[in-house]
Image: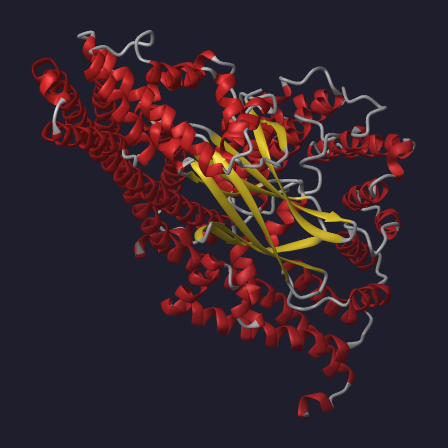
Amino acid sequence: MKTIHMASIFLILFFAQPLMAKDAQEKPKIFFSEQEIQGQKKLFGIHYTIPIELISRAKYQYQLAIYLLLSGDYLSSSQVSDELLNSALRDRSNLLLRLSDNKLFYTSRNYPTFAADINSSNMPDLIPVLDVCYKMKQYEECLRLTKNVENSSIARYFEGMSLLGLDRLEESNMTLEKVSTNDDLYPYAKIALSQIEVFKRDLKAAKGHLKALLAHPLIKKNGLAERVSLIFGQIHFEHKFYSKALDEFSKISLKSAFAKEAIIGKIWSLIKLGRYGEAIQEIKDYNLNFPNDALDTEVQIALGYSYIKINMANEAIEVFQTLLESSANAEAELEKIIEDKSLRNQYISFLMEKKDQLLSRKNQYYFSMIEKDPSLSILLEEFTALQIFKKAFIELERKINDKEIYLIKTKIGLMEGARRIKKEVKIFKDILQTVEKIKKKRRNILLDGAESNKYFAILENEIINSYQETLEQQVGKEVKGLLRLILWEWIDQGMIKCQESNVICAFMNTFRNVHLVETLTNVPLPDKHRERILELMQVLEIIAEEIIYLQNGKKMNLENKFFVINQNAEKKAQNINETLEELNRLKKELKKNLAYIDSGSKLILEILDPRLREKLIKIKYELLHHKSNIASGWNMASNMRKKESPSIKRK
Amino acid sequence: MKKTIVIVLECVFGLILVANSVCFAESVYSNQEESLNELINRLNNNYDLINKSLKKLETNLNNYPHTTLTMSVVKGDKNINIVSIEVLDLDYPLHSHIYTPLENKALESGSRHQLFRGEIKEGGHTLKIIYYWAEGGAPPAKGEILINLFLISSKNYFIQLSFENKEGKIELEYSLLSVKNR
């Protein structure tokens, strides 16, 4: 097996060009044909039992892109998806590309990945793209994409919603009105239409849309009824119809996604209706975990005032006291962070690494407020994106360095290989020419006497050695024996042609007769014997052919082959030089980009601290605003208690 | 920078002392953010350009005898967790990968993980795949398969490894993928 492989060294290593040309003429194929496999089995005794499956390149790449996206390598998934945009999977790849880019650039936002549906054949192609664009507030892009969709209600819905997102209320209104009543998105369009009317302060028209919607059969689906009730409640509240608002808020279940908004709506409706006792009960049932957010603090303040309204001074004091203590602690804590840069740096590093769990519970609260602040979160996202790019550029740099080393080594190997072959071809030719010269001059002498035999044996060895070196192949004693026969015949008869040399012709004809070779290689012989036969035939064919060329005054096969090798080697060395230059240019580009990343990261770090301090001061002022309300409530409750019991003062 | 912050505070809380300075700080921030946004977009474009240039160079260099082996992993049985896969060419380690829960989940969605891609010497190869997998709370189990290949120069070989449940027994199946441009 090794013999065959090494003997075809010229074909495999140095004659890529003819091979490539041959490949190009043939139908493109990546694996062995069945015939090839069978051929390989026969020749090499390797048993191919591996099943072969067909897959389109687009599908293969698409599957890779999904894996990269779902496993968090968004930059790579973006790259692979981008390459697929001209494939049959264009729309799906477009979706993957957008998801990848959005995950890459907006790291802190929770965008959908469609993990479950992404491979489903039922997944519509362009609609999820619209959905993603809309969710990501890319309204202009969404509008552009809807133009590519046929006249569909879904496209009109997203078009209308995008226009709404862009505050183009009239256009949005007109577009959403086009959504067909039979469409699944019709109720959502109606809700959006009612929202438009709310924005325009036409609450009557808003109610009209919602009332029309209540009669629609789809309203019972996907919690739509509760969403409608919430909007209805809010509209009634705005109209100061508190009782109706309360009714609508009460329709929303505690398990609903809108439960919190509904309960707060209920609480404020009850307070506005003067039903303080019920409001208090509602707040207690809600069991708010203070402090949660500014809205919850306001609910707690409302609780205190409700107690005052029903003359429960002690309970009111208790609520306000707790609020005062919490806000005083929070204020002191905030003050500390505002003044201490090292504490802020701690926050910044936690924000960057998203390690809020290392903070105390109270600080986690500030952490979440800080993290949600758009001016900070955008900076953090940008910082994360820069770090992702830094990693990616460093990886590219590593690839380029590897490629450079590989190319330099290949170039050296190529040139050295060409030089070595040139030298060895010359030696081989010299030896064969020497035989030819000796034959002409000293034929008679060579054929007589022991000295001549000895001299001939030396020549024979030289030919064999040279052959072995040129082809990097060892030949066995059978080859040597047969070569001797050829040389004797050559010298004896002066010519080597098939019609005159029975020995050579027999072997050459055998080798060229594929059927015979197959028969020979299939005879029940041990593998090594079969290989030996092939080796003999190959070696003899090469040497015999070269001798014939020499006799005819033509260039040897090896010389012609070397000419092509040399030409190819020079061409490839030139190609390598050009590639190395291009790689060098890319490396310079990479370095420039890495420098941009470093300056960008530095800039973010410079902006982050003042931005964080600014946010903390803002939180502190919000707290102070609440604190004044809490203090007023506490004073009112205390005065009330004083009036009720003079002993309070003493206490 | 300190002066800037003071002005920002004044903007936020309405304690404006010098009316003309009101938007100065915000505009500084805004410009910086715009430049950062532009920088990220530029980096994205540059990365894309460099990556494409590199791929183009690689394609040009494919005139050399170029034999590549690509191995990818899919999950036929979605109930198992792949712990790790190690690929050896005879005894020479070619590549290994430890799978995270996220990567396992990604494979469950029908996606494909490209485990290895590299140039490989033509001729005979015996690839040994050592893999660990776990099911439920059970400790990881080990499996091993051998793949005999004879690679011809200038060809690209794609091997797919798939975790399958064969009558209750987890097996790693392998096949040669013929990846067609269509």
Q: Number of callouts in the render?
A: 0
Q: Nearer the viewer, residue A641 or A277?
A: A277
Q: Quadrant of residue A467?
A: top left
Q: Quadrant of residue A169?
A: top right
Query: Residue A101's spot in the image, x, y percent?
Result: 51, 37
Q: Is residue A73 above or below residue A563?
A: below
Which residue is pictured at 78% across the width and 83% down the height?
A644
Q: Nearer the viewer, residue A292 or A268?
A: A292
Q: Quadrant of residue A477?
A: top left
Left/right of residue A133 with respect to residue A510 in the rendered view = right
Which residue is pictured at 17% across the width and 31% down the height?
A457
Which residue is pictured at 77% across the width and 87% down the height?
A645
Query: Residue B106's spot in the image, x, y percent?
Result: 62, 46
Residue B65 seen by the camera: no
Q: Nearer the viewer, residue A460 or A68?
A: A460
Query: Residue A231's spot in the image, x, y percent?
Result: 79, 42
Looking at the rendered image, the quarter that the N terminus of chain B falls into is: bottom left
